[in-house]
Image (tube, rainbow, N blue to C red):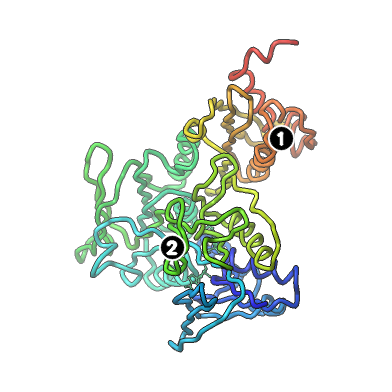
Amino acid sequence: MHLVMIGGSDAGISAALRAHELDPSAEVSVVVADAYPNFSICGIPYYVSGEVTHWRNLAHRTAADLEATGMRLRLDSTTRRIDAAARKLVVTAADGAEDVLAYDKLVVGTGALPVRPPVSGLTGAGALGPADGVHLLHSMGDTFALMRTLEESAPASAVIVGAGYIGLEMADALITRGLRVTQMEQLPEVLPTVDPALGQLVHDQLAARGAEVLTGTTVRQISRAAAGEGGRLQVEATAAGGTPVSRLADMVLVVAGVRPDTELAAGAGAALGARGAIAVDRGMRTSLPDVYAAGDCVVTHHRLLGETYLPLGTTAHKQGRVAGENALGGNREFAGSLGTQVVKIFDQAAARTGLRDHEAAAAGFDPVTVQSEADDHKAYYPGSHRITMRVTGDRATGRLLGLQLFGHKNAGIAKRIDIAAAAIFHGMTVDGISDLDLSYTPPLGSPWEAVQIGAQAWARQAQPEAQAPS
Ligand SMILES: Cc1cc2nc3c(=O)[nH]c(=O)nc-3n(C[C@H](O)[C@H](O)[C@H](O)COP(=O)(O)OP(=O)(O)OC[C@H]3O[C@@H](n4cnc5c(N)ncnc54)[C@H](O)[C@@H]3O)c2cc1C
């Protein structure tokens, strides 16, 4: 049995490791377009900031560690074509040599590509690129190009286009490196994956660290600045109401989201689904015989929404593991995502899981969202922090649908969101959260855990009749 994985990031490597774990005798090959298998691209902002001191430290495992498990890595090798009927791949090596690789089962883990928004100067002939100080960010190659600009041109200022979680992490990184940062976001508030009330708190953090934050601002054009201006590049945008905005900067970083990289699978005839991602069933099977797919290139099964597209590293690992197991003949299912995520912005963190109010309403629930605050631990013990919470539940059934959190990075934001993720996963009610037996000691918590306080605030407001003594 020869299993072949295309892609050497979270999905492809997870699939290969799982297959090897289950059957050490299975022949497993991983075809990777670059020379950086199993790198944690989620860690790129911390290498750029200097907190991770060498890019090699971003490797989850080294190539030698991976090969020691028995898998065969074909690095700098790009798969050009899948012939699903013949169960063969056409692969080109770095020197251009073409090779045909036969497989019994194939796992496609080609991931995502950064979106290049329709901005003049970014697309078409003569588009600006890394040599001009204009960067996109997804791969290790993109990271090396960005570091070259930072180290060789020593830019003093940057415009970041986009204020999603990667844009925010990069604002943190570039400000930590001493650059002046202007962040432009076309939506009304930064971090649009959380409610504007929490986005505003993130916005305030950026501003407090010296970033100029321009929300409701759509970038139209990036061009080379005239000599003698205060920056290499000129960024033209339109603010709300049509007001023109222009900024000079030494570099521009475009982080405007990702799209699934499906060219290879689609070219072989695989059916596509939400947002053009590869359609897969819960066992990560594509519409092609003996071809599985996982990670950022596939649709995401969401536990509350059904099929959607929600690319995250945590999901890619889980889907890859399912694909690797099933490629060996297993029958595992991906249990589904809740979109659980957390981001650190300087010394604060924002997190969400499940649905926000408008998403829940669109999915047919009767949502109510209640904002409240609590301390991360007893305030009499030094170092406590306030946590802002937004709990979303279904008015009719009391079911917990979502939680959003904002607070200090040492306030347990990531693990507190995971309480709600586990509760939503198992279909708990908001009221049921209060019954959970959670840990307590004054330096680390309170007798009523913060998330339980948030749940009680929700119940008081959304279901006051249920609060009366029975
Ligand atoms: C800066 C940054 C920060 C992030 N932070 C987080 C975070 O904090 N938490 C989180 O959950 N997620 C985060 N993510 C998202 C996460 O990294 C992705 O969801 C995850 O990497 C997806 O893994 P993947 O294996 O599906 O695809 P990718 O990581 O996109 O990898 C695709 C792989 O396929 C290879 N490939 C593509 N085409 C071919 C071909 N034709 N032939 C051979 N090989 C090919 C590529 O070389 C690569 O190895 C972050 C992403 C970035 C860029």
Looking at this rendering, what residue extends furthest in the left direction? 226
Which amino acid lies under the numbered mark 2 shown in the image of this protein? Leu
Disc 2 C-beta below 8 A from ligand 1: yes
Question: What's the residue type where badge 1 is placed?
Answer: His
Q: Quadrant of residue 224?
A: bottom left
Q: Is residue 395 visible?
A: yes
Q: Is mark 1 within 8 Å of ligand 1?
A: no
Per the model, the C-alpha gap separating discs 2 and 1 is: 41 Å
- Quadrant of res 406: top right
Is residue 187 or residue 344 the one in the foreground? 187
Horizontal side of residue 470 vs 252, given as left or right: right
Q: Which residue is mark 1?
A: 377
Residue shown at 46%/89% (left/top)? 97
- Does 110 sit above or below residue 279? below
Determine whether label 2 and label 1 are within 8 Å by CB: no
- Pinpoint residue 278: horizontal percent, then vertical percent: 49, 59
| Residue 396 sits in quarter | top right
Mark with earlier residue (2, 1):
2
Q: Which mark is residue 113?
A: 2
Q: Please provide percent x and percent y for residue 96.
A: 43, 87
